[in-house]
Amino acid sequence: QLQLVESGGGLVQPGGSLRLSCAASSFILNYYAIGWFRQAPGKEREGVSCINNNGISTNYVDSVKGRFTISRDNAKNTVYLQMNSLKPEDTAVYYCAARIARSYCSGYVEADFGSWGQGTQVTVSS
């Protein structure tokens, strides 16, 4: 089964930073755009950021613009989400997923993404 694996979550104080990783072991990531999503307690999962297959084009939801940076290293088959200036409202389980049959990003409709990882918990609290 083709699946992505997230890592790098943890507990951090407000204003702190974390870097999440999204790795694929059984398929080549560089054919696909990759999206990061998050689900906070009691809320629906939402798209956060997306990067196209060659890393040239990225996009972010307004709530994380200027604080989060998505990048990828195709040689390592890994996508990253650098999260700075973290806020309590960033607390969520973070997931990555591959855009189905697309090398570019076009929104955050969950049905358009596959190979979801199991998620990594990010908690921002003092």
Image: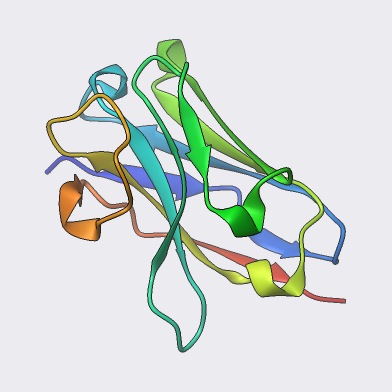
**Residue 115 in picture, x, y percent from top left:** 21, 46
* Residue 93 in the image: above or below residue 58: below
Q: Residue at x 50, y 84 (%)?
A: 41
Which of the 4 image quarters holds residue 123?
bottom right
Identify the residue at the far top of this view. 75
Frontmost residue, 18 versus 83 = 83
Identify the residue at the far bottom of this view. 42
Colour setting: rainbow
Q: Residue at x 21, y 30 (%)?
A: 26
**Residue 80 in picture, x, y percent from top left:** 54, 34
> Which quarter of the image is occupied by the N terminus?
top left
Image side of residue 52 versus residue 111, left or right: right
**Residue 20 in picture, x, y percent from top left:** 58, 44
Which of the 4 image quarters holds residue 78?
top left
* Residue 89 in the image: above or below residue 79: below
Q: Residue at x 47, y 16 (%)?
A: 56
Frontmost residue, 51 versus 5 = 51
Q: Residue at x 35, y 36 (%)?
A: 34
Image side of residue 59 versus residue 66, left or right: left
**Residue 126 in picture, x, y percent from top left:** 88, 76
Image side of residue 108 versus residue 92, left or right: left
Frontmost residue, 65 versus 35 = 65
Image side of residue 47 versus residue 86, left or right: left
* Residue 58 in the image: above or below residue 16: above
Which of the 4 image quarters holds residue 125?
bottom right
Frontmost residue, 122 versus 53 = 53
Tag count: 0
